Image (tube, rainbow, N blue to C red):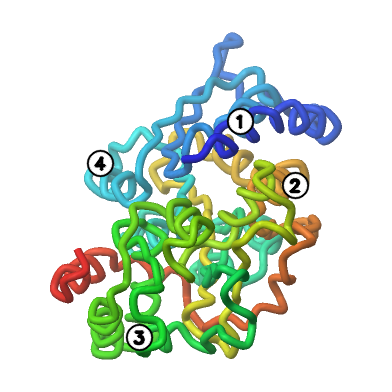
């Protein structure tokens, strides 16, 4: 994780707190226990503490009679833990980095239905079709490229074109990264196992270079080590915000694959409430809190993710989410990580 992803959220916490003071109501203490004892809300968070910690702190300030306990970890691992714990899970809320982990709990019937008022804040493409989780912010898979060497006309129309000879040794990917694995899962669901296997093997044969993380791919493009890489959109904007260069002179730009190509998958972070939650009312308040304007603005301003609710303006340097030609994917179908890992291993990628 680069410095900005640790520092910017802490800087933004004061701004969020001010917004909360304006939007907080008289019911902040409704969930207090008998005799003034604090109620406890337990959150399992697949989002990093340096990123969402300020949001949790702000919610706790808005709810002075509530104690917040957070268990941070990998989203897929936390989802597996919740499945293991079943009705005994101490978690009230699952705040996931990835829709696939939420989909896994949906498939197990472990999530409670959310109110229509909560679901209605977010477009149906970014929430559970079963109504038991909702997206809180969005990110797009893109092809980052070196605009010192390439122009828009040089770029491929489809992610499947990256197996062509002209891209040999010029492409980077991060096979162990969760966002890449979700993307491969989406490819399996939309294009089929055979085509996905063929693409993975073709990328291997084309000397695609493996990196640990999205940010490392971005930096490899900036240093001239590779020409293009498959990453999430916000990593380039992050580097610009860090002051490495302005948007025009920074050497890495974003290419959004057209025509509904799977290379332009939009995935979401999201929140679900466990059926076994001991503090369901508090959990519901936390879910609505994440969709309120101050928090949606936080996602837009501090991380350049796409806000999904309350018509909060996005980063103006990005295309509007509605203008991106997205593939037709039910995000809950991204739950089959096990099948994706097996395919990646069988294809020699892992």
Disc 2 residue crowd, few under 14, some 14–19, many 20+, Cα 10 Å: many
Lower sequence index among marks 2 and 1: 1
- Label 4 and label 2: CA atoms lie apart by 34 Å
Disc 1 residue crowd, few under 14, some 14–19, many 20+, Cα 10 Å: few
**Residue ID for mark 2:** 297
Q: How many marks?
A: 4
Left or right of 290 in this view: 180: left
Lower sequence index among marks 3 and 4: 4
Q: Are marks 2 and 3 in contact (CB under 8 Å)?
A: no
For image coordinates 33% across by 44% down, the residue present is 78
Disc 4 residue crowd, few under 14, some 14–19, many 20+, Cα 10 Å: few
Residue 62 at x, y percent in the picture: 70, 26
SS label for mark 2: helix
**Residue ID for mark 1:** 7
Q: Residue furthest left?
A: 346
**Residue ID for mark 4:** 85
Lower sequence index among marks 3 and 1: 1
For image coordinates 37% across by 80% down, the residue present is 187
- Closer to the camera: disc 3 or disc 1? 3
| Number of the label disc, if any, that sits on residue 163 | 3
């Amino acid at each position: 994780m680069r410095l900005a992803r640790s520092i910017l959220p802490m800087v933004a916490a004061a701004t969020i707190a001010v917004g909360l003071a304006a939007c907080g109501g008289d019911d902040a203490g409704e969930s207090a226990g008998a005799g003034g004892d604090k109620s406890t809300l337990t959150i399992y968070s697949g989002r990093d503490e340096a990123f969402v910690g300020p949001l949790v702190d702000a919610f706790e300030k808005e709810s002075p009679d509530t104690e917040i306990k957070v268990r941070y970890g990998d989203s897929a691992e936390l989802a597996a833990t919740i499945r293991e714990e079943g009705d005994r899970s101490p978690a009230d809320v699952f705040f996931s980095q990835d829709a696939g982990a939420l989909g896994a709990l949906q498939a197990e019937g472990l999530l409670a239905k959310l109110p229509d008022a909560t679901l209605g804040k977010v477009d149906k493409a970014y929430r559970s079709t079963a109504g038991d989780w909702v997206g809180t912010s969005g990110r797009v898979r893109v092809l980052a490229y070196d605009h010192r060497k390439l122009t828009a006309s040089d770029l491929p129309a489809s992610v499947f074109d990256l197996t062509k000879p002209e891209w040999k040794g010029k492409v980077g990917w991060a096979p162990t990264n969760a966002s890449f694995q979700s993307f491969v899962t989406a490819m399996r669901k939309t294009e089929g196992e055979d085509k996905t296997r063929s693409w993975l093997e073709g990328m291997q044969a084309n000397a695609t270079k493996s990196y640990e993380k999205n940010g490392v791919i971005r930096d490899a493009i900036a240093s001239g080590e590779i020409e293009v890489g498959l990453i999430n959109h916000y990593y380039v904007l992050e580097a610009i915000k860090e002051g490495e260069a302005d948007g025009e002179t920074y050497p890495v730009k974003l290419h959004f694959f057209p025509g509904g190509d799977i290379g332009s998958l939009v995935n979401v972070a999201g929140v679900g409430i466990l059926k076994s939650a001991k503090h369901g009312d508090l959990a519901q308040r936390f879910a609505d809190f994440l969709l309120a304007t101050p928090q949606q603005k936080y996602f837009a301003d501090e991380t350049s993710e796409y806000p999904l609710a309350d018509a909060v303006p996005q980063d103006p340097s990005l295309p509007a989410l509605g203008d991106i030609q997205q593939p037709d994917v039910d995000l809950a179908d991204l739950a089959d990580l096990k099948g994706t890992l097996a395919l990646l291993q069988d294809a020699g990628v892992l």
